[in-house]
Image (cartoon, rainbow, N blue to C red):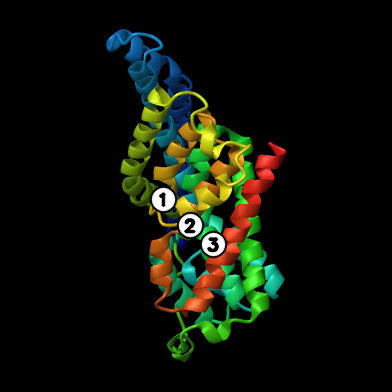
Amino acid sequence: MAASAGAVAAVAHDRAARWRRRLVGAAFALLGAALWAGLYVILAPIARALTYRLLALAPGSHLALAVEFFAFEAPKVLMLLLLVVFGVGVVRSFFTPERTRRILAGTHESVGNVLAALLGVVTPFCSCSAVPLFIGFVTTGVPLGVTFSFLVAAPMINEVALVLLFGLFGWKVAAVYMGTGLAIAMGSGWVIGRLRMERHVEPWVYEMKSGAAADGAGPTTWADRARFGLEAVREIVGKVWPYVLAGIAVGAGIHGWVPTNFMASFMGKGVWWGVPLAVLIGVPMYSNAAGIIPIVSALLEKGAALGTVLAFMMAVIGLSFPETIILRKVLRPRLIATFVGVVAAGILTVGFLFNALF
């Protein structure tokens, strides 16, 4: 009887200890959120004080405009990245690669296109992992068109792109970019699926055995998921922060020295060939969202049209030339050309549509 009472007491003690750890964790989370919010709202005054008091730059000068832009945008974007990457990292803890494949395999193709594009937003895959992902999806029964919906969405619509767009343009442009990017991913996958181009996949891909991949259960408690989110911050923000600062620095230079409405001469709303030119320039470029979006922000400010800017950004992020080279390992040239053509057509449509509407 005494042993049984001791066991019950031990269980109660462990349960109380877990609750104490949870309360302490929640308290630290609330304190961190309050500190983050307090710092975020005073970034603009700090940037002005740094520019005009500490550095004593002349108001309205090119250098002052550039320095104030950088001093405000750089910490703002990095703070947003820290917050959102952590949150998305927690969400990602529910989606291992194997679980993602199982969700997509066996669904109706049209439903699969939608699910694949949505999963592409919250899964940590980029063009460098295109080949192993493609093989894994195809060999586990995911339809070809659904696989392409995922491959378009994953690099184009990710938390880094959305955070930067929100921080630099506001929630409306971020929502527009997300919606149009999802539409391109879903539509491209659906078209490729209708074309029945499986024969243009390299034969050795289908000869591979899918294997009984372990589920990789991943984190199961909220403490584990929080650690997963912190690891995502370390990996993602640790990799992209130089691109963020470099992109904002270029954007600051454009903000300070490029004359107002200069970009309207070849990227403005009235230049019909601006959208195709932006796509042609963007495809060969190799950059991620962290590097290109601050530059795009400055271009828009100097007179470039929203549709042209969105087309340029989507071409750089979603149709990079290096990704097509990587995909050549598993796809034949005709399928690669079809993929590029279909996605480019969607991007052009977005560019022309937004130039006409906005």
| Upstream in sequence: badge 1 or badge 3 | 3
Q: Residue 230: tell me if it is visible.
A: yes
Crowdedness near tag 3: few (<14), some (14–19) or many (≥20) residues, C-alpha within 10 Å: many
The relative height of residue 145 versus residue 119 in the rendered view (above or below) is below
Element under label 3?
A: helix
Asked if marks 2 and 3 touch (Cβ < 8 Å), the reply is: yes
Q: Quadrant of residue 205?
A: bottom left
Is 281 situated above or below 110? above
Write the residue at 37% across / 27% down: 70
Neighbour tally class for label 2: few under 14, some 14-19, many 20 plus, Cα within 10 Å? many
* Residue 42 x %, y %: 45, 18
Q: Which residue is mark 2?
A: 155
- Closer to the camera in the image, 122 or 288: 288
Return the residue nearer the eye: 309 or 172.
309
Q: Label 2's element?
A: helix
Cα distance between the residues tagged 1 and 3: 14 Å
What amino acid does circle 3 point to? Val
| Contact, mark 1 vs mark 3 (Cβ under 8 Å) | no
Verify CB contact (< 8 Å) between mark 2 and mark 1.
yes
Vertical arrangement, residue 256 with respect to residue 341, above or below: above
Per the image, the residue denoted by label 1 is 288
Could you tell which of marks 2 and 1 lies nearer the N-terminus?
A: 2
Which amino acid type is shown beneath numbered disc 2? Pro
Identify residue type, mark 1.
Asn
**Residue 46 image-quadrant placement:** top left
Residue 216, quarter of picture: bottom left
Could you tell me how far apart the alpha carbons at marks 2 and 1 are, in whole angstroms? 8 Å
Residue located beneath label 3 in the image: 152
Give the quarter of the figure containing the C terminus.
top right
SS for dot 1: loop
**3D distance between C-alphas at marks 2 and 3:** 7 Å
